[in-house]
Image (cartoon, rainbow, N blue to C red):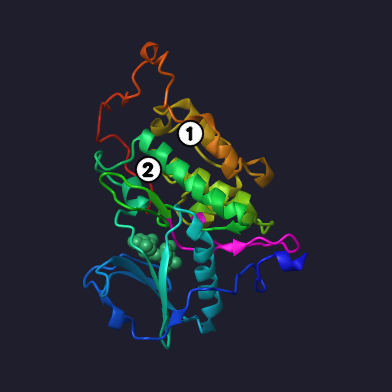
Amino acid sequence: SRAAEPSRGPCGLLSEIRTSISKEPFTDHYTVIPGRELGRGKFAVVRKCVEKCSGHEYAAKFMRKRRKGQDCRVEIIHEIAVLELATASPRVVNLHQVYEMASEMVLVLEFAAGGEIFNQCVSDDKEEVFSEEDVKRLMRQILEGVSFLHQNNVVHLDLKPQNILLTSSSPLGEIKIVDFGLSRVLSSHRELREIMGTPEYVAPEVLNYEPISTATDMWSAGVLAYVMLTGISPFLGENKQETFLNISQLNVSYSEEELQQLDRGALSFIQTLLLKQPRDRATAEQCLKHPWLQFSEPRDPLTAEDTPPVEDQEAPSADSTSSTSPHLP
Ligand code: ADP
Ligand code: MG
C-alpha cells in the first residue's frame, strides 16, 4: 500500500517538510557569535548564534546548496524532513527554524553546549575521559535514539563520535544525535547500497556493495562503544585501504589493556555488534536489553545491604601516562 508510506524521492530521500522556509535575512533575526565555529564539514559550517527576539542560543548549520556543481537542495530538504520526523525523540537534536538564501540554507538547531563526544573519547586528560558508567548511560541514550530512527525506517549511516553531541560536558549531560546528511529511509521494495560514511565506522556490507539496513548502523554503534571505552578506533589503519581491509577481515583486537579492565559485559556487548553478517548483529532494541546496559539501580531494598556498593570501584590506574593515547586522527 503506497499511500501508507511517506513520500520519498529516488533513493530513500524524504521530500516533504512542514517547517516553513524563511527567505528573510538570517541576520535580521539572529546574531552570529563571532569567533570559533562550532564545527565544519565538507559542505557545512556550524556557528553559534543568538535569536534576537528570545535571547536563546542556537547552532546554525549553514549548508551550501551547490556542491561539486550539483544542486543538493533536495538532500537538504531530506535532512530537514528527518529532523522533523525525529522531533518526538529527545535523543535527536531539535530543529528550530530554516532560512534560505541564494546559495545557502540555514538549519537553526538546538544548541548542544557539550560539543562532540569525540573530544572526550580522545582526551589525554584522565578527568575528561568517560568512565565505564558514563559510557553505559550515554550508550543507552544513543541506542534509544537509534531505536527510534529504526522504528521509523530511518538509517543514519554516519554514526560516529563527531555526530554525537552532548547537552553539557561537565557535568556530563545527555546525548543528541546530529547530522542526517547521509541518512536514508529504507524501503520494502528497493534495496539501498553503498552510501559511504566515514571509513573507520563503515560496516563491511557498505564496502562490499551489499544491501544496507538498520544493521549497518548497529555496526557503527559497536565501533562507537569500542572507541568510547578505549579511546582507540578499532579498525583505523595507516590509510583508507588498510582501514577497509581491517573492516572486511574483521581485524579487531579484543585484547587491548583498556578493554580487559572493563566489565566482561562490555566486551560481550561489542561482540554482538561487530559481526560480519548484518543479520547476526543485535538490533537497537536487543542492545538495550543486553546485561551490560542494565541499570545497577534501583536495587531490591531487602537485599541491598548484602551486595557491594555500586560506587566507582575502578582501581586507580597504576600509570596514567601508559599507552592510552588514542589512535584517532
Ligand atoms: P556535517 O554534515 O558537515 O558533518 P554536522 O551536522 O555533523 O555537519 O555538523 C558539523 C559539526 O558541527 C558537528 O560535528 C558538531 O561539532 C557541530 N555541531 C553540529 N550541530 C551542532 C549543535 N546543534 N550544537 C553544537 N554543535 C553542533
Ligand atoms: Mg557530521
Whether 102 is drawn above or below 258: the answer is below
Kind of residue sitting beneath label 1 = Leu
Label 1 belongs to which residue?
A: 293
State the residue lying farthest toward the left: 35
Residue 186: x percent and y percent? 66, 60
Which label sits on residue 314? none
Q: Name, please, the residue furthest toward the right.
A: 1
Whether ligand 1 has any atom under 8 Å from the Cβ at mark 1 is answered as no
Magenta span of residues: 177-199
Q: Which residue is mark 2?
A: 231
Q: Select label 2 or label 1 by which is in front.
A: 1
Q: Earlier in the sequence, mark 2 or mark 1?
A: 2
What is the total number of numbered labels drawn onto the structure image?
2
Ligand 2, by image quadrant, is bottom left
User: The N terminus is located in which quarter?
Assistant: bottom right
In the image, residue 184 sits, relative to residue 262, either above or below, namely below
Is residue 291 toward the left or the right of residue 259 in the image? right
Q: Residue at x 41, y 54 (%)?
A: 176
Query: Measured from the top left, where is residue 213 in percent x and y?
Result: 65, 54
| Disc 1, SS | helix
- Measured in 3D between alpha carbons, the distance from the residue under mark 2 to the one under mark 1, in whole angstroms, is 19 Å
Q: Residue furthest bottom?
A: 102
Relative height, residue 296 to residue 110 (above, below): above
Q: Around disc 1, counting alpha carbons within 10 Å, would you say few (fewer than 14), some (14 to 19), or many (20 or more)? A: some
Write the residue at 65% across / 71% down. 8
Image location (x, y in percent) of residue 209: 67, 59
